[in-house]
Amino acid sequence: MKVGLTGNIGSGKSTVASIFNCMQVPVYHADEEAKKMYLREDVLSEAVSLAGEQILDCDGNLIRSALAEVAFSEPQILKALTKLIHPLVLQNFRKWAEQHCESAYVIHEAAIIIESGFREEYDHVIHVSCPEEIAIERVIRRDKVSREMIRQRMQFQLTDVEKASLSDFVILNDGHTLVIPQVIHIHQMLSERSA
């Protein structure tokens, strides 16, 4: 069974993914795999043609922060990069999932599962919900970026409420509600459904 794990920036989906992983559930981290895709010559070349030479350092390596800056300030470039990377990541995930077919279910952790149009790929989707202001504060502490930059990135994601309405399970990660019992409960339900 394939389970998508999503949530907006700062929601804590990586924390939730690590809890599932502690329970021996294989987790595929889409962001990490997407970064690897940019090491491919064909992908990097296409990214440069979309975003310009300023995304490369003097040795011709990708400067991730420069790519993010261009992408999140130019919606058309972001859309084109998403169209380039996401099918490659999905293809990679499918192969990875086959290698973990002995597990009751696997998790694909990605911020824009629903936005990228791949919702139907999963048997179930879990959304990690978090109030926007708490999420912003978390990202400021984690990434040392401005509130404006975070809000700029948030505008490319569906709202928390929209994502929750399109998901099968919602985990509330507001800093007050215990997360581990919610994960255990969902894990039990998923394990039963895959039996």
Image (spheres, rainbow, N blue to C red):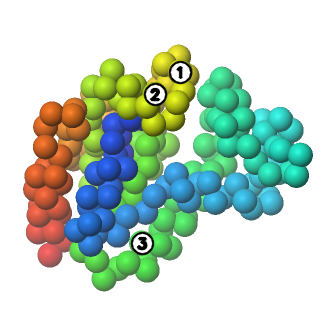
Contact between labelled residues 2 and 1, with CB atoms less than 8 Å apart = yes
Asked which quadrant contains residue 11, the reply is top left
Left or right: where 148 falls relative to 57: left
Q: Which residue is mark 1?
A: 146
Q: Residue furthest bottom?
A: 102
- In the displayed structure image, the side of residue 162 where residue 151 appears, left or right: right
Tell me if 128 is positioned left or right of 33 in this view: left
Residue for point 56% across, 59% down:
33
Q: Estimate the spatial distance between the alpha carbons at disc 3 and disc 2, rounded to whole Å.
A: 33 Å
Mark 1 against mark 3, which lies toward the viewer? Answer: 1
Amino acid type, residue under disc 3 in the picture: Ala
Residue 37 percent location from the top left of the image: 66, 58
Q: Measured along the vertical axis of the image, is residue 53 above or below residue 146?
A: below
In the depicted structure, whether residue 58 falls above or below residue 177: below
Q: Of 13 and 106, which appears nearest the observer? A: 13
For marks 3 and 2, give the one nearer the viewer: 2
Mark 2 belongs to which amino acid? Ile
Q: Quadrant of residue 177?
A: top left
Q: Which mark is residue 108?
A: none
For marks 3 and 2 on the same chain, the one whose residue lies earlier in the sequence:
3
Spot occupied by residue 44 in the image (x, y as percentages of width and height) = 77, 52
> Counting other residues with Cα less than 10 Å from the Cα at mark 3, is it few (<14), some (14-19), or many (20 or more)?
many
Label 2: how many Cα within 10 Å (few below 14, some 14–19, many 20+): some
Pick the front one: 177 or 8: 177
Identify the residue under disc 3. 97
